[in-house]
Image (cartoon, rainbow, N blue to C red):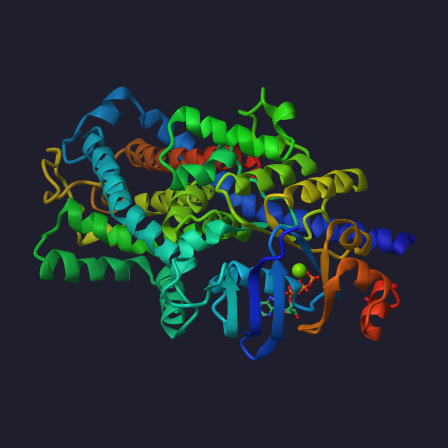
Amino acid sequence: MSERTIIRINHFNLFYDQFHALKDICLEIPEKQVTAMIGPSGCGKSTLLRSINRMNDLIDTVRITGQILVDDQPIYDKGLNLVSFRKKVGMVFQRPNPFPLSVYENVAFGPRLHMKLTKKELHGRVQQSLEDVDLWSDLKDSLDISALDLSGEQQQRLCIARLLAVSPEVLLMDEPCSALDPNATQRVEELIRDLKNDYTIVIVTHNMAQAARVSDQTAYFYLGEVVEIGPTEKIFTTPSKKETEDYITGRFG
Amino acid sequence: MSSRALLTEKIAFFCLLLCTLIIVIPVILITAVIVKNGIAGLSWEFLTQSPRLGMRAGGIFPAIVGTVYLVLGTMLFALPVGILAAVYLTEYAKDNWLTRVIDIAIVNLAGVPSVVYGLFGLGLFVVFLKFGASIIAGSLTLAIMSLPVIITASREALNTVPQSFREVSLALGATRWQTIRHVVLPNSISGIVTGTILALSRAAGETAPILFTVAAFYLPRLPQSLFDQCMALPYHLYVLSTQVPNIKPHIQYGTALVLVLMIMIMNIVAIVIRSHFRKKKLW
Ligand SMILES: Nc1ncnc2c1ncn2[C@@H]1O[C@H](COP(=O)(O)OP(=O)(O)OP(=O)(O)O)[C@@H](O)[C@H]1O
Ligand SMILES: [Mg+2]
């Protein structure tokens, strides 16, 4: 297991207008591991996740202080090339959101934007991405069907494949299983464990068991602050803070 | 449910039905009257020939052609400007005072009476820019009148595209423009087109904006250039109804019928486009 830190969050604050949504967050996220973010609704997990790939830029009222570094590059610096940076940090959403295009076109979307590929190379890339999420064998004969005709699980896998096709380093997942049934959830969790061999994963989840199953490191958030962060095993067995224990044992949240 | 509640329910239902019928009845009556009186006037000759004998005989071909030109001209000007403005407002504009002023302007423009647009077009295009009464002046006037509706409809269409589509596209490293071009527009174009067609069909039937800017009282020759005047159905209908004594009613009603049919066809096209895309239920 590598221990290199890929994402470093330094005294990061975020305001929606006057509302102080993230308070002095300091976090380190190690490469090729799964970091889980847990905490009650509204504590800022999604906000932090969206800060890591600068999606909050789309919201006019957001102000930030502090810095986030990805690969030692300060991502809120003016000189940053936003386009190539965002490619490096992909995002998976709560509800699967494939484009209303064919399976193939969904995966080919990113490569078509960035890479001058021949037809064959593009096809290879699509195949590789679909193989990485275990969809290839199911869908190789139906690449032309609309992605919207897939099951929820397949759609979510497709959304992951769509990201993998642009070779990101980090995958941000905001409650990626919350729209899936328990069996599908289990299979997607397996996928996440596989993916961590090649990618750094940050996952937000409301499902304690899921955090315990998939993550190496867990951060507990409360009201915009990191209450506790540590190895998942420790957080779930011997948390050092009382609040964390209360939340995990379900007395709260 | 008590019998009393049941009765209330029935009465309420009846009232609602009645109100709905009140909306439908005038539409049916108008259509019926126009069709009944106008169908006799419709003939190949009527559709393809120029008016004769002081418009008491012959056809309305120049007016049909004129209206088609005006609709196309309006579309040419209003569609690109409308779409680009809507894209700017939904995708780029920050929520600041300028945007709010623009919003208010659009809402108010939509409420300006059409004769005011006509006078504005006269002042700006015909006189100041020296286009004269011409197809270009009339189209521009109609375009300005249609813009608020087109912009509003396009913004609504753009807003139906899920925000997460934009975010995914950006997260895949697309630029904002690539996102608009490859994700936002393809997923909203049906709404934009539908709204535009409805706005154009409205423009096709307007008299006041073309009165001073393009419409010719009587011009049997077809227009040769953008700077020519032309006849147009709504104005021709107005002329037939008020300026030509002893005219046979089937000519007036026939003209009205042709105008209504043109507008109806445009609306049907809009509905077909919309239901076609709805069936494909995008997300
Ligand atoms: N665009 C916004 N404008 C203003 N406030 C916002 C905005 N988005 C989120 N907030 C507020 O910021 C706080 C954190 O929201 P966030 O969505 O990050 O919480 P979360 O931890 O992801 O919650 P959940 O578990 O429900 O997804 C909430 O109080 C929310 O109301
Ligand atoms: Mg959230």
Within the displayed image, which quadrant is ligand 1 positioned in?
bottom right
Eyeballing the image, is A38 above or below B51? below
Report the side of B115 relative to A240 (left or right): left
In the image, B42 versus A73, the foreground residue is A73
- Residue occupying the far left of the picture: B130
Residue B71 appears in view: yes
Q: Position of residue B21 (x, y in %)?
A: 60, 45
Relative to the observer, which residue lies in front, A40 or B235?
A: A40
Q: Position of residue A191 (x, y in %)?
A: 69, 40
Quarter of the figure with residue B226: top left
Q: Is residue A252 visible?
A: no
* Residue name at image x 74 percent, y 38 percent: A187
Q: Position of residue B156 (x, y in %)?
A: 47, 53
Q: Where is A140 relative to B209, above or below? A: above
Residue at the spot 20% in from the left edge and 49% down from the top edge: B138
Residue B89 quadrant: bottom left
